[in-house]
Image (cartoon, grey):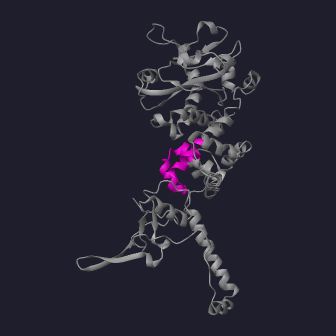
Amino acid sequence: MVKRCVVCLKQETRSNDYSFHRFPTDKNAQQAWLRLLNQVGLNDVSNRRVCSSHFDSSSFITKSSSKNGINIKNLKRLKRGALPMDLTTPAQVTWSSRSISTQTDLNFNDLSSLFEKLSVFEQKMFATTICIERFRHDDTNIRYYTGFRSYAIFMMVYELLQVKLNMTIILLYIQYVLNAHYHIRDHQKHICLRKKISFFLFMIRLRRATDEHELGIFFNISQTTVSRIIIAWTRFIYSVVSSISLWPSKEQVQQNLPFEIKKNYPLVRVIVDCTEFEIEQPTNPQAQQNTWSTYKNTNTAKALVGITPNGVVSYISPLYGGATSDRSLLNMIGAGSLIELMEPGDQIMSDRGFALDHQHSHLTLIHPPFLEGKSQLSPSKVIETRIIARHRIHVERCMGRIKNYKLLNGVIPMKSIYLLNYWFYICTFLTIFDEPLVKVI
């Protein structure tokens, strides 16, 4: 593993002369180091290093390392009780008469040259930093890291959220959920991690499933802080997007029906399908039974998703155990259920695994025809199957877009189950900002 300085981010290479030193094991000494290095917010320093540039030369015991009698390099070892240089106060500069007199030797061209070099150095540092501004003109990497098509769409979503974004609320979320006992100023230092950058961090976690420890290295913060940022943004974004009504009126659906579906199934209100996410096996036997999916042959969480005929997400159900059948998910009743949103005469398009209960006779289910004991379908039924498949492909593509958020792709550990419903809803909602599923002709 490459050693990296926690203060200046220098890395160990064969060509440099820096040595890298662990924090002392004594807690009081650790706190003294953190205070002097202006890194008080760090919690876990067990694997952190500080490079030799942050110590006075008198702090080292230097000895040579040789192989076959040939000197290879000087190894630096810290003296017992050595302390790093104080970075919490500005360095005091003592001007000598010589330095004052030579200041006049610097002309405008010299200063311009220095500033040009400084600008190049800043650009190099900027290019090696994971920062949203770095990708302002790089839509390919914006798509890779966040799932948004462009920087403009990333900013549009961020601005929409910022209307309701109150960092005080986010800080309270963190304190309440994780019982964090930090000073508010320390929170603002890391969480305000500039709001836009912390949102960028959250989207990377969602889209790429990047490990929290790795994100901590990228953004120069502790893994604990990364975890708190992710939980805070998860709860905040869910509270915003779940309050937005996705269900369009019948008139809106009718006005935007694609030509082919309008010709064949003009009363279709929604196209539905189910999706499942693998979870870690619960320890409770009843929970194991409730989450066992015979289709996936593992423990899963399962949900129902609906889109309008023109391809826009219009319904997102809560997650249920993987043992719940497609039919049960469709026929659930109560506030927020799909059945409660439907109106008499509406049609639902699905695959063969769905069926409506008798009490929902005011609705019609459109699905591919069954063989009904015959060896093959009649020509008219074959045509009907193909037409339905052409329309249903859009909801399957929608499911694929949800799974593009890789955080939902792996096995969800039990410690994160309480966030899974939020992540699923957010990822499904964000597919709305992708390219249209159905092209307008």
In the image, residue 98 above or below residue 72: below
- The residues colored magenta run 202-231
Q: Does the magenta stretch include residue 383?
A: no
Q: Identify the image quadrant of residue 79.
A: bottom left
- Residue 225 forms part of the magenta stretch: yes
Q: Is residue 265 above or below residue 3?
A: above
Q: Quadrant location of the C terminus?
A: top right
Q: Residue at x 72, y 43 (%)?
A: 160
> Is residue 435 something one can see in this rendering?
no
Q: Relative to the observer, which residue lies in front, 132 or 285?
A: 285
User: Could you tell me residue 414's position as x and y percent?
Assistant: 46, 34
Residue 106 visible here: yes
Secondary structure that dominates the magenta span: helix
- Asked whether 245 or 178 is in front, the reply is 178
Residue positioned 59% across, 37% down in the render: 427
Indicate the position of residue 407 as horizontal and vertical percent values: 51, 40
What quarter of the picture does the N terminus occupy? bottom left
Quarter where residue 169 is shown: top right
**Residue 226: % across, % down:** 54, 49
Residue at 64% x, 7% y is: 361
414 left or right, relative to 71: right
Q: How many marks?
A: 0
Instruction: Residue 104 in the image: state x and y as whole percent.
Output: 69, 91
Q: Is 360 on the left or on the right of 210, as rendered? A: right
Residue placed farthest to the left in the image? Answer: 68
